[in-house]
Amino acid sequence: MLTASIHFALIAAVLGALAGPRISWAIRAWPGHETFHCDYLHCADCEGGVRRGCYNAGRTQDRLYIIISALVAGLSVAYFGLSIKAIISWVFAISCMIITIVDIRYLIIPDTLSINGCWAGLLYAAACWAWVKAGYSAPSYNIEFVDSLLGFLLGGGFLWLLAWLAVLLLKKEGMGGGDVKLLAAFGAWAGWQTVIGTVIMASFLGAVGGISSIIYQRIRYRKEYRPLTHMIPFGPYLCFAFLFIFYLGLDPLLRLLDTYQFWLLSRMN
């Protein structure tokens, strides 16, 4: 049985590696039009782009994407078995990788992934409901349709409210629309409980990352900080927090919060 699991994991790793060039193609398609034009398949061989330091040029990143895709696919099958959850694990991880890279480079989150992710998550939850109602056993990754719908509404509504308040109070955009749609997609796929955990963890990580970035730019480039002018890509923090909860659950986050609360109380006393 163990040998069969290893074989399945190796086959999944090979399939993941074969998907690597398409992942590169997907990343190179942004920003701008979000269409997978065939010209982007030749970016790796563009010597002019390499000289100019173009994000899309060169083959180094292609090799990295192949390795990451193969590792995620193999480990997903090794951990979850040959199941729907293993496939979803690979899809989540690779989608979050694409979003993270594009958001860091261009400060945008592709609507192709976020908006389509919302509808796909809701449809998957509806399909799970219909499958169970038909008398079949629940799939390896099952989400209640009500949880999915509440997660979609809470995920999109919470960040939309923050964005609206930022415009109202600060007269400036404080939260990009891409982040709102991304969190709504996470909610549609994982439910409202995951949305709450993702927001808490991503907010903490974003605060630490933002402050660290300001300090680094101050020390490295002598750049003076001006309030409300420092752009921080929030998508990567949302992706990391979502994957953390997807793989490890909410319990580790709750334990971390309890530890943090205990530390605060000890400092106050």
Image (cartoon, rainbow, N blue to C red):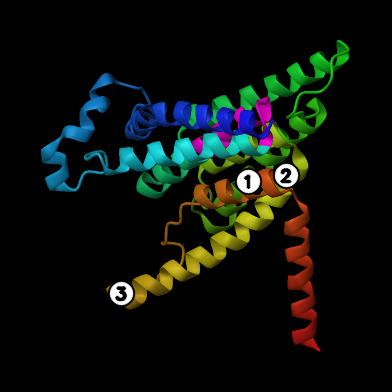
Which mark sits nearer the N-terminus, 1 or 2? 2
Mark 1 secondary-structure assignment: helix
Q: CA distance from mark 3 to mark 1?
A: 31 Å
- Residue found at the far bottom of this picture: 269
Please name the residue that numbered disc 1 is placed on.
242
**In the rendered structure, which amino acid carries the disc numbered 1?**
Phe
Q: Are marks 1 and 2 in contact (CB under 8 Å)?
A: yes
- Residue occupying the point 55% across, 52% down: 237
**In the rendered structure, which amino acid carries the disc numbered 3?**
Arg
Quarter of the figure that contains the N terminus: top right
**In the rendered structure, which amino acid carries the disc numbered 2?**
Thr
Residue 119 higher or lower than 217, as above or below: above
Label 2 CA crowd tier, 10 Å (few <14, some 14–19, many 20+)? many
Stretch in magenta: 80-94
Q: Position of residue 262 (x, y in %)?
A: 79, 76
Residue 133: which quarter of the image?
Answer: top right
Mark 2 secondary-structure assignment: helix
Q: Position of residue 66 (x, y in %)?
A: 39, 36
Q: Position of residue 30 (x, y in %)?
A: 35, 33
Quarter of the figure that contains the C terminus: bottom right
Magenta region, main secondary structure: helix
Label 3 CA crowd tier, 10 Å (few <14, some 14–19, many 20+)? few
Which mark sits nearer the N-terminus, 3 or 1? 3
Please name the residue that numbered disc 3 is placed on.
220
Please name the residue that numbered disc 2 is placed on.
194
Which mark sits nearer the N-terminus, 2 or 3? 2
Q: Position of residue 258 (x, y in %)?
A: 79, 68
Q: CA distance from mark 1 to mark 2?
A: 7 Å
